[in-house]
Image: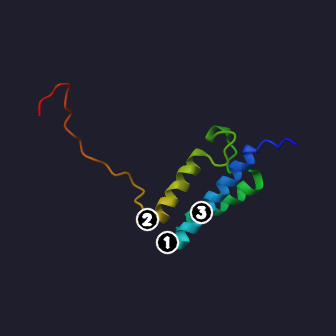
Amino acid sequence: MKSKAPDRLAAAKRAALNALKRARRTADRAGVTLSEWEGEFLGSVEGRIKTYGRAFADPEKGAPGQPLSMMQTVKLKEIVKKAKGEDARLKRKGFKPRQGFGAKR
């Protein structure tokens, strides 16, 4: 008996739902309070994925097989970083002097 090929859309949907649950759980365990907007974002995206299979309607905002748009993925990663206590802002470094080819120290 042949096994059926895995449904990639269903797998992507499950992965997105698990990522949303994991983000909320990480914030709860760390004692980090999410802002009202972040909590609403997680809830609304989860609801749209459960209902429609994806959280965005415009095909230009993300790949056809993905349940989250590019910006939703970025925001989810920012929420996870906040829950883990990592600084979400970029750390900038100063300019370093450039050494040319064969430059002496």
Q: Give the residue number, with chain letter if any, for mark 1.
A: 30
Considering every residue shown, the one lying at the far left of the view is: 105
Mark closer to the chain start, 1 or 3: 3
Quarter residue 42 falls in: bottom right
- Whether residue 54 is visible here, answered yes or no, is no
Can residue 47 be seen from the camera position used here? yes
Identify the mark at residue 5; answer none if there is no mark: none
- Along the viewing direction, whichever of 71 and 4 lies nearer the viewer: 4
Asked if marks 1 and 2 touch (Cβ < 8 Å), the reply is yes
> What residue does disc 3 label?
22
Looking at numbered disc 1 in the image, what kind of residue is underneath it? Ala
Image coordinates of residue 33 in percent, x first then y, are 51, 72
Tell whether 24 sits left or right of 83.
Answer: right
Going by the picture, which residue comes out furthest to the right? 1
Q: Amino acid at mark 2?
A: Gly
First of labels 2, 3 by sequence position: 3
